[in-house]
Every structure is written in structure tokens, then in C-alpha cells.
Image: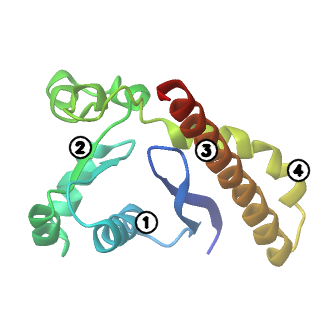
Amino acid sequence: MDETGVFVTLCQHMIIQFIMDMVQCGERAKFPLTTAEKLMNVFSSNQLYLYDVGCTFLATIKRSSLADTAKTLNFKSCTGAFHGAAHNCPCQLDFLIGMIEGAGLEDGEGNEQIFSASNSLAMVTHHATAYYHHMQIHIHFEKWDEEKYENLGIYVQSSVELAG
């Protein structure tokens, strides 16, 4: 199996919830289905799952073993602002993040940002052994999360100071 990259699931604050090493092995829908199932098990109801092809992904969930759970937990899927612009009008009206009530001002393209920031890993991991390859990826994303937690703390602190 050839390695094709990583599949990352972020929260709205851009903190990594799950990261999977993707390998080429047939059905690619298993990666988002796996994270969707994990999100439903961990965080329960009323979740909005953003995916490049959120419209197709929702249809995939409805045909999967997760269908009943997703319906019960009000699990919804949508498409980000950048990728959704390429979809047709009916799809955009139903799945574009800007059209989803409660989604706020989020553009839904956090994964694009995280992958752009991780491009520098290529020169470090290209010729590395599998162990060092995974270690460098782990360190990079661990530092990513630390920075996001720090920024979130600064935001909360400044909000409290402004309110007080």
C-alpha cells in the first residue's frame, strides 16, 4: 500500500481532534466515515461536519451503518466556502457553510490552512524512515495544537479584560 498522506479532523478552533495516516487501499470514504463515527461517539448530538464534498458525504453516511445514529444525533454535513463554490446552486443552498444556520462566520477551510503550514515537512520527511517520518509529523501537529491553545487562551483572557 502506498502512503498518500494524512486525514485530519479539526474543531472550529483549528485544534486537531483526530489525525490518521492514509494509505491507498480502495474505498477512501472510510477515513471521513471513521472520524464521523468517532465524533458521534465522543461528542454526541448536533454536530456539523465540514468536508470538501459534504453533499456526497452525507449521502454516503445515509447508505452506511451510521445512518440511524447520524439521524438520531442530528449529525449534519456541509461544504466549505472554497470547495462549495464549485458545486451547483441546489447543492450550495443545502450544503454551503455560509448557508447553514448556526455555522457563524466560519469559512470551513481550516484543513487547507493546516496542510499549507505542513508543506515544510516534506523536505524533512521525504527520505526519512517510517519511524522518523511519523515522529516529525507528530511533532509538527503537536506544536500546531499548542499554538492554537495558546491563541485561544490569549483571546479568552483579552475578552475577560474587556468585559471586566
Q: Quadrant of residue 90?
A: top left
Q: Is residue 88 left or right of residue 4?
A: left
Q: Residues within 10 Å of mark 2 (few under 14, many from 20)?
A: many
Q: Which of marks 3 and 1 is in front?
A: 3
Query: Up-down: is 148 above or below 26?
Result: above
Q: Nearer the viewer, mark 3 or mark 2?
A: 3
Of the image marks 2 and 4, the number of the one nearer the N terminus: 2
Are the residues tagged 2 and 4 within 8 Å (C-beta)?
no
Assess whether mark 1 and mark 4 are in contact (beta carbons under 8 angstroms).
no
Q: Please state which of the two labelled residues, at mark 4 or mark 3, is closer to the viewer.
A: 3
* Residue 81 lies in quadrant: top left
Rendering coords of residue 101 (x, y %)? 19, 32
Give the mark nearer the N terminus: 4 vs 3: 4
**Residue that appears at 40% across and 31% down:** 106
Return the disc, 3 or 1, that comes first in the chain's sequence.
1
Q: Residue sitting at 42 percent across and 36 percent down?
A: 108
Three-letter code for the amino acid on which mark 1 is drawn = Phe
Residue 98 picture location, percent across and down: 29, 25
Question: Is 106 positioned to the left or the right of 159 in the image?
Answer: left
Residue type, mark 2 in image: Cys
**Which of disc 2 and disc 1 is earlier in sequence?**
1
Residue on which disc 3 sits: 153
Q: Residue 55 carries which label?
A: 2
Instruction: State the separation of the CA atoms marked 4 and 1.
Output: 26 Å
Among the two numbered marks 3 and 2 on one chain, the one whose residue lies closer to the N terminus: 2
- Residue receiving disc 4: 123
SS label for mark 1: helix
